Amino acid sequence: MKSKTIIKSISGTNKVFEIINDDWGSDWIKFDQENDDGIDGLIQVRKKGEWTGETIYVQVKSGNGYVKTFKKRPNLICIQLNESYIESHRPRWNSLKGAVILIFVNDDKKCFWVDLKDDSSYTSENKSIILVNKQNRFGAHSKGHFKKISGFFPEDRHIPTVELNNENLSHIKLNQPLNLSVRNFYKEWSNSPKEERTHKSLGEIIVNRVGWRHISRKQRGINKIFQSWLLLSAAKKIIQEVNVLYENRNENTSDDELRINTNYALRAKVIFPNRQESIVQVILRGYKRINTTNKTVEQKTWFYSVYEPRRGINIQ
């Protein structure tokens, strides 16, 4: 029989999933309990179906049993954990690349959030509690709200710049249909020397049918397909010059193998010779398989997508 605590935990996590899936149109990736290490899951933020590269790591606490009331803090929800839990997990929360929040779901299914990287979320008077502002409701509006918080997501001024010249746009042939010229460029890129497909942190990037099928699938719509085709040369240069800006991973363990699946986002401000500069994002996917018996490691990373996450917004 499930305990009331487990039932409330599952119900609270389901509520968070409902908001992320239905209201945000984004992904909730649940972590296995044995691998959570103070994180229950992560939010992979999407805009119009495309991953923005923004990731939010989440710890979920459900039920009013976690609440401790203090008369001197009427505007705060004090989440009672324990001192050793907070002390052991804060270094982990601070080290993660991306935002890290706690979402509290009360017995009425109302959700509140707090930034676990913010020192003001803690108090030296009682090191066993986390302070949640009652005004920080977590819901459909939060997706846009988080983008307005300074420092919550990396800002444009920290994004590297990549400059293209006319030669970089030569994959578009005026004497050929667009789909033919970009397909030929993709094949040439796929068969190019390893050095031309090497990322300084991830090593060789495989350019294969997975990426082509993704960016060219009909479900994306003709505008997104054309946008990705036109940006292929920018993607090639970004992979060569830009380090990883965002990443999220999911670990799966079997009897003799640990598999780590990872999504990477490389983002750059691209200066084009023929139009206005824009933010361009490249998505890579990869895995690492570690055989825990013989200690062998297999690792691969491949190109998955390229697009402008702010298409239609005037980038200054």
Image (tube, rainbow, N blue to C red):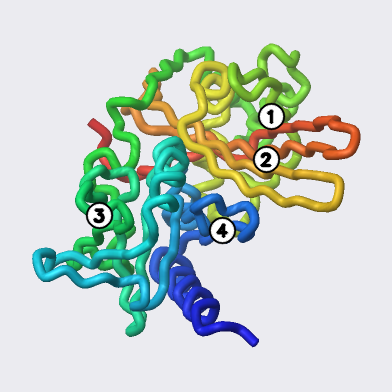
Residue 54 pos. (x, y %): 43, 45
* Vertical arrangement, residue 64 with respect to residue 27, above or below: below
* Vertical arrangement, residue 281 with respect to residue 122, above or below: above
Mark 2 = which residue? 211
Residue 164 pos. (x, y %): 45, 17
Mark 4, Cα crowd under 10 Å, few <14 / some 14-19 / many 20+, is: some
Mark 3 = which residue? 126
Mark 1 = which residue? 186
> Given the image, on which type of amino acid does mark 4 rest?
Ile
Please name which of the two marks, 1 or 4, marks the residue nearer to the observer.
4
Mark 1, Cα crowd under 10 Å, few <14 / some 14-19 / many 20+, is: many
Q: Residue furthest bottom?
A: 1
Please name which of the two marks, 2 or 4, marks the residue nearer to the observer.
4
Of the image marks 1 and 4, the number of the one nearer the N terminus? 4
Horizontal relation, residue 191 to residue 196: left or right: right
Of the image marks 1 and 2, the number of the one nearer the N terminus? 1
Q: Nearer the viewer, residue 46 or 313?
A: 46
Circle on res. 29: 4
- Tell me the CA gap for discs 1 and 4: 31 Å
Q: Nearer the viewer, residue 121 or 311?
A: 121
> Given the image, on which type of amino acid does mark 2 rest?
Gly
Query: Secondary structure under badge 3?
Result: loop
When asked about the image quadrant of residue 258, the answer is top right
